[in-house]
Amino acid sequence: MTATTTSARSELSELGRSETALRTFLHGLPGVDQVGAEQRAAQLGTRSIKTTAKAQAIDLAIRMVDLTTLEGADTPGKVRALAAKALRPDPADPSCPHVGAVCVYPAMVPYVAEVLRGSGVHLASVATAFPSGQASLEIKLADTRAAVAAGADEIDMVINRGAFLAGRYKEVYDEIVAVKEACGPADGGRQGRPAAHLKVILETGELATYDNVRRASWLAMLAGGDFIKTSTGKVPVAATLPVTLVMLEAVRDFREATGRQVGVKPAGGIKTTKDAIKYLVMVNETVGADWLDPDWFRFGASSLLNDLLMQRTKLTTGTYSGPDYFTLD
Amino acid sequence: MFEYAPAPESRSVVDLKPSYGLFIDGAFVDPTDGGSFKSINPASEEVLAEIAEAGAQDVERAVRAARTAYDKVWGPMPGRDRAKYLFRIARLIQERSRELAVLESLDNGKPIRESRDVDLPLVAAHFFYYAGWADKLEHAGFGPNPRPIGVAAQVIPWNFPLLMLAWKIAPALAAGNTVVLKPAETTSLTALLFAEICQQAELPTGVVNIVTGAGDTGRALVEHPGVDKVAFTGSTEVGRAIARSVAGTRKKLTLELGGKAANIVFDDAPIDQAVEGIVNGIFFNQGHVCCAGSRLLVQENVADRVLESLKRRMAQLRVGDPLDKNTDVGAINSAAQLERIRELSDAGSAEGAERWSPPCELPDRGFWFAPTIFTGVTQAHRIAREEIFGPVLSVLTFRTPAEAVEKANNTPFGLSAGIWTDKGSRILWMADRLRAGVVWANTFNKFDPTSPFGGYKESGYGREGGRHGLEGYLNV
């Protein structure tokens, strides 16, 4: 890291101390032209990814899936089955990579942890009164600590959208800082377990404008988020290509300013291989190869995995199997 | 790394004939003197087909055919019937758009992504749009019952071969004129395929005639006494010669010539989108665009940041096989044009501007030029004044809005301009002061058949597109 980025980084870390400084900084970010951003996203969507490139993209996408179930009806049996699938997505083909993580509610974490232990598949848990975030800070922090204690090594928190939309940026910032702390000490503490990675869900469908998405992205990164994530999947508008484009531009600019790399996770509504490949093309051409890794880019999805598996089988065998040849969980 | 595998569009949709005749009076005919020339693929220098060269006698035949069709069929035909043919042509263009797009990329060198997603949709839209006007001319604002002019001689350039054909033929036919069109000698093929579409649409014979050839053919056409209207798109130099030759005749003239557009980026601009706009402004169609944003005027206090983003973005441009669906920048259209781009770029370096191109591998055969920017350019440099018509951007800076206007207008051209700012009031203030036919705000190189297009000063006169585009083809 150069001297300039070090000083820029310490300057930026001061921003969270004052509401005014935070507001001035966030409102001073370059605006996003809606038409232009949507046009760029659509243009990237016309890339034609075939043969070897497609095979490479499919395997990468599988490794990036956060296989998710976030239902009131989730049971230990259901999440165990999901975890088993995360380890061996295609039982018929041992060359198929495992997914990036399993993502469940805190109450389900212990059951998933049993299955995943030592596998390299991460265990993510939503926390902080997901999906609305409408609870007191104490409850959000307790929720987070409980998930970490039960074995989650990734926490997907929601930001306080009400505070953000009302312009109370410091409140949003402080909450993220507090949740980050609740993820565990950075040095691993007495137990020697590294802090859980913090993914900050912006719920872009509720932020409505790309300017807001850019500001919320910076806010989350300034507060220490390891990942920024688009959506909970629980509101009508989830991940879109233009929103992800704006977030990718934000992580790119943030790394340039501070030297710290932050990951991006679009979540919700990504159902097909074709969709996933569009996202990978966007990552490739916006932030480059450094982010083309499950450590830096994830898909929050459930049904996407089976479509990826079907396309993978089609590429390797030349025949397209029906949905009955892939496991439903 | 994520390498995109080759994704070539298939050439098999195009049925290329070894040779093509002239399209006169509804049929393909051999030229009277048998002259011909070759059309090559600029990406490989492979010969695509042998094209007939029309001499003075062939032009005479074509103009006579157009005259007869005008007097006997097309002129007297009710507008709603003309519309029927134009709608039919528009639909056939849509149906055969893949074929036309592949042929356009083969002959011109432009990426298939552009011919497929930009050129062809606009070509069809143009015919649909003017088809709608054919029976509504008396509501176009030119008085009751406006009359067509007669026979139109139309000469078009090689940068958007089929699109320029559409810009010329669609309004002419909608207004009730008949046409003799000469495509550029390096890009005749889609015009000849269009001739087949006219046959397929059962357009009455002689309404559209296509004479292929180079400068001499064009001169014979515009100087022909039987022509009532001349429409030209191309270089200012040729435009001037045409204006001289029709001066003192009864011919009506519209000219759409060169440009040296300023793309103006203010410090409050949405930077990422502005960078896309800069790239689209100058590298779209290899910069072979008369309204290309070839001069970037960037506010000094954000110049470094914009340039850094621009360079990073340029490194993502994929230069190569025009038929690969992932190609962003294709081949330069001809050896002659490549020579001109090289000559002016060398002048830029010699005059002290700093040249930069992203690392990019260019194919061995064919005509190629890497996307290039020059920084440290001043108004006095040739690369800031002359139209390069290639993927070469000159970057200048300004400090105040007034200085931006002054520099933008300080050119003999006036075709287009772009403004990038978050302030609506500034867009309007600038647009009032920029002497350019088209001013884009927070976008660039956007075209629509409903919108008039044309220049100030040495960029020509007359408007094409929209209601205004009818005026050049009506006796008003």
Image: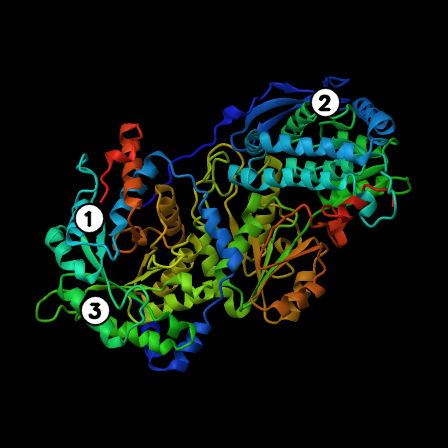
- Chain letter of the residue carrying label 2: B
Judge left or right: residue A277 versus residue B385: left
Judge left or right: residue B8 versus residue B124: left
Judge left or right: residue B168 versus residue B360: right
Q: Amino acid at mark 2?
A: Leu
Q: Are marks 1 and 2 on the same chain?
A: no
**Element type at mark 1:** helix
Task: Say if B451 sits above or below B181 in the image.
Answer: below
Which class describes the residues within 10 Å of circle 3: few (<14), some (14-19), or many (20+)?
Answer: many
Residue at the location (22% across, 60% down)? A105
Judge left or right: residue B286 versus residue A163: right
- Chain letter of the residue carrying label 1: A
Q: Which residue is mark 1?
A: A82
Residue at the location (56% across, 38% down)? B115
- The residue positioned farthest toward the front in the image shown: A73
Q: Which residue is mark 2?
A: B22
Work out whether residue A258 or residue A198 is closer to the camera in this orientation and state it. Answer: A198
